[in-house]
């Protein structure tokens, strides 16, 4: 049975009209789901009973089960969610001054096996549907009692551009005034460098933010950190990023996770300056890695991090040092799921 959240406002209107029901009821249904947080059609009290029965018969309105919630000292909250087929995904709530960001997953598991990330250690299960992606956002919204969800980042488990159609459909619902009405410029899609997806996104006409995970500026090293680099090497990726900037006139954020003993030397910084110099609109987010004991990855010392940042700034690269969030609750991608599955499989 199709989940009703997979329908855009226009698609739902078409269904309603096809049933011989007045078009305005589609807006009411959307309001119940996205503004009032209804979890059952029976709650939609201003709809005719016959329509509620019809909706119940034709559609589902599911919500993931929160099986674990952990709150960090810095107020970051990580949720472990169970889908209807028992697959587990993670979502993170990141409060900051004047904003609350939701970090959401797009796949159950991940096939890309980045060396610093726990998401790929348990293998790839499947893509999330657009409805399941939206459910994560609704789940976050429900937990924010006196705060408003202002920003979304597709940086949780999975590669968004490997689940392109479902991610884009979810974004259109999240962005729509009838849906969650989160502005497109407050939505960020993060990719490990899927070139066809970046090209396709540049043609969408959406003003979403694009974030590209670099983590190294030499092919040999990047291929060790991100195996996807073997398929989409730096030269091709950076050329595609340049095309994206020229086509959209939008800035790209390059994510660079700093890992001790791997990619955090001054030579690594010089290499990064070299490959980014020709890009007109870009910035670099430097993020000390969240420690993952199973993978043997740890952040560099503070002084090494500052030297790296300053080396970029001195060469005119807009570099921002981002603080890792939720380290004490293992908020990096896949860590909570990994711990849970280890405990329950032992």
Image (spheres, grey):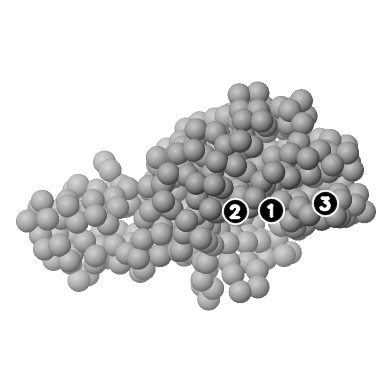
Q: x, y percentage for residue 231? A: 61, 24
On the rendered structure, is 77 left or right of 84?
A: right
Quarter holding the N terminus is: top left
Q: Nearer the viewer, residue 203 or 131?
A: 203
For residue 251, which numbered disc appears in the image? Answer: 2
On the rendered structure, is 166 left or right of 215?
A: left
Instruction: Give the mark toward the camera: 1 or 3.
Output: 3
- Asked which quadrant contains residue 124, the reply is top right
Up/down of 237 relative to 77, above or below: above
Instruction: Return the disc, 2 or 3, that comes first in the chain's sequence.
Output: 2
- Asked which quadrant contains residue 30, the reply is bottom left
Q: Secondary structure at mark 2?
A: loop
Contact between marks 1 and 2 (CB within 8 A): the answer is yes
Quarter holding the C terminus is: top right
Q: Secondary structure at mark 3?
A: loop
Instruction: Return the disc, 1 or 3, that comes first in the chain's sequence.
Output: 1
Q: x, y percentage for residue 232? A: 61, 28
Mark pair 2, 3: CA separation: 18 Å
What residue appears at the point 65 percent right and 73 percent down from the top-left corner? 97
Instruction: Return the disc, 1 or 2, that comes first in the chain's sequence.
Output: 2
Mark pair 1, 2: CA separation: 8 Å
The residue labelled by disc 3 is 315
Q: Nearer the viewer, residue 236 or 117?
A: 236
> How crowded is the residue under tag 1: few (<14 C-alpha within 10 Å), some, or many (20+)?
some
């Amino acid at each position: 049975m199709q989940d009703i959240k997979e329908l855009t406002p226009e698609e739902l209107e078409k269904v309603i009209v096809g049933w011989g029901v007045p078009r305005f009821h589609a807006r009411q249904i959307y309001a119940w789901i996205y503004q009032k947080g209804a979890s059952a059609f029976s709650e939609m009290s201003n709809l005719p009973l016959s329509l509620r029965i019809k909706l119940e018969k034709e559609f589902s309105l599911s919500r993931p089960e929160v099986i674990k919630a952990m709150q960090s000292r810095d107020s970051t909250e990580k949720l472990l969610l169970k889908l209807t087929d028992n697959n587990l995904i993670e979502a993170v709530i990141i409060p900051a001054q004047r904003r609350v960001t939701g970090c959401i997953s797009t796949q159950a598991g991940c096939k890309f096996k980045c060396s610093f990330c726990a998401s790929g250690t348990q293998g790839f299960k499947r893509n999330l549907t657009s409805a399941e992606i939206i459910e994560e956002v609704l789940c976050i919204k429900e937990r924010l009692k006196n705060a408003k969800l202002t920003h979304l980042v597709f940086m949780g488990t999975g590669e968004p551009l490997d689940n392109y159609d479902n991610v884009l459909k979810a974004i259109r619902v999240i962005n729509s005034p009838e849906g969650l009405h989160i502005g497109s410029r407050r939505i960020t899609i993060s990719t490990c460098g899927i070139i066809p997806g970046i090209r396709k996104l540049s043609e969408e006409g959406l003003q979403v933010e694009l974030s590209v995970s670099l983590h190294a500026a030499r092919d040999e090293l990047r291929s060790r950190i991100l195996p996807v680099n073997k398929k989409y090497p730096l030269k091709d990726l950076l050329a595609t990023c340049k095309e994206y900037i020229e086509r959209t006139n939008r800035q790209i954020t390059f994510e660079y996770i700093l890992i001790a003993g791997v990619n955090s030397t001054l030579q690594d910084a010089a290499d990064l300056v070299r490959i980014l110099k020709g890009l007109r609109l870009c910035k670099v987010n430097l993020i000390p890695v969240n420690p993952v004991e199973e993978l043997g990855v740890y952040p560099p010392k503070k002084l090494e991090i500052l030297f790296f940042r300053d080396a970029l700034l001195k060469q005119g690269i807009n570099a921002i040092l981002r603080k890792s969030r939720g380290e004490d609750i293992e908020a990096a991608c896949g860590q909570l799921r990994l711990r849970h599955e280890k405990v329950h499989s032992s």
